[in-house]
Image (cartoon, rainbow, N blue to C red):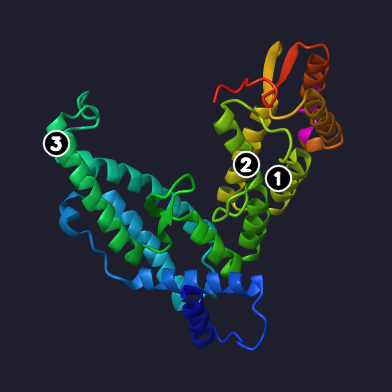
Amino acid sequence: MKFLVNLTFTVTIFNFNLNASWTQDDEEKFLVEEEYHLACEAAVAPEHYGEFDSEIPSPFRKAVSDYKNGWKKFCKGKGQSNTSFANFSRELEIILKLFWELSTDIEMGWLGKSRSDPTYFRPTKEERVRNRERHFKFHDLSRDHFTKFIPAFKHLPRADGPDQYDEPSMEALARIAMGYGSKEDKIFYSDYLLLIGKPWERGSPWREYYEASAVFIGCLRFKKFDWVANFKRIDRMKQELNEISYLEKVHKIEKEMLRELNINIPGSLCACGPKEEVLDIYNKLFSYFSNNEGYSMQAPKMEKIIKAINVDEIVVTNNYEKHCGGG
């Protein structure tokens, strides 16, 4: 029923043709438009902090105000302004950081203690009860009001359970950027989302890889994640992007990937597959790095690891045969 309501809304506002077949692309377009209109409504909505108004620090207020001002200009131009989504991304990350600091301070702030106080995170039983009450009140405030006056602030289900949480949502921002962003915005989000997976969907390659590590604590999945294809994607983004904040994200995930691949010798590797699969991946990486100037310094490292695996200086254990992960 909810889908039918949304579909009617789409026809009224965005002029989609009901008689045409409804495709996945149509649904994605609708979601982009929906996120855009919700963000623009939030940009002009008054800020409301309820009973916590006196406890909201000025850096958080300023970050929210600056962020909303950018959205007001963008929405006033009906999505045609020169405002880069890279700016929104930077500002939203600042708000995210300040929000989590704020949520902690709100829950503990009634104690009148500084975070440097050694008893700050060791409340008494009575204090824990009061903290819990404040936690739920602040949660209600963020759900009922922050989501209405901060663009791309969402009430979301947790990926790992039924609980809900509220926070600035990079996923909503990514969706709007894919529909309304500049050429560089679209280059970044299209390739970056192919690398990490759409943040609003399960099953991203990099997330799957890390979920395997989390479940098996140290079990590296040398199966589903296509290392060479994704290093090629990273290399392409580095060549096509100029925006510093986007490049920083690309370099960060590149660094994480290289760190995972570079294993100490002698050492051990708990893998989610047999030794042969691990060697196949390292051989492909060695070949790619050897023929790519940008990764030429990584090729000798891959070669050393291949030799070490072959002579068991790096011992590869298949987690599915011997539970090496510890999870």
Query: Please, what is the three-letter code of the amino acid marked with disc 2?
Result: Glu
Left or right: 147 as drawn, with respect to 249: left
Q: Earlier in the sequence, mark 3 or mark 1?
A: 3
Query: Please, what is the three-letter code of the amino acid marked with disc 3?
Result: Leu
**Helix, strand or loop status at disc 2:** helix
Q: Specify the label residue 208 is tagged with.
A: 2
Calculate the distance from the C-alpha at mark 3 to the C-alpha at mark 2.
41 Å
Which residue is drawn at the image coordinates 59% and 39% (left, top)?
A: 252
Which stretch did the figure color magenta? Answer: 295-300
Query: Please, what is the three-letter code of the amino acid marked with disc 1?
Result: Ile
Which residue is drawn at the image coordinates 58% and 49% (left, top)?
A: 244
Provide the residue designation for mark 1.
234
**Of residues 126 and 293, the one drawn nearer to the viewer in this rendering:** 126
**One can see residue 26 in this view:** yes
Which residue is drawn at the image coordinates 36% and 60% (left, top)?
A: 66
Q: Specify the label residue 149 is tagged with.
A: none
Left or right: 69 as drawn, with respect to 106: right
Q: Nearer the viewer, mark 2 or mark 1?
A: 2
Q: Earlier in the sequence, mark 2 or mark 1?
A: 2
Q: Earlier in the sequence, mark 3 or mark 2?
A: 3
Q: Nearer the viewer, mark 3 or mark 2?
A: 2
Provide the residue designation for mark 3.
111
In the image, residue 216 above or below residue 148 = above
Calculate the distance from the C-alpha at mark 2 to the C-alpha at mark 1.
18 Å
In the image, residue 83 above or below residue 60 = below
Crowd rating for badge 3 (residues with CA inside 10 Å; few <14, some 14–19, many 20+) = some
**Helix, strand or loop status at disc 1:** helix
- List x then y, in percent, for residue 9: 48, 82
- List x then y, in percent, for residue 276: 82, 26
Q: Quadrant of residue 325?
A: top right
Q: Is 299 a magenta residue?
A: yes
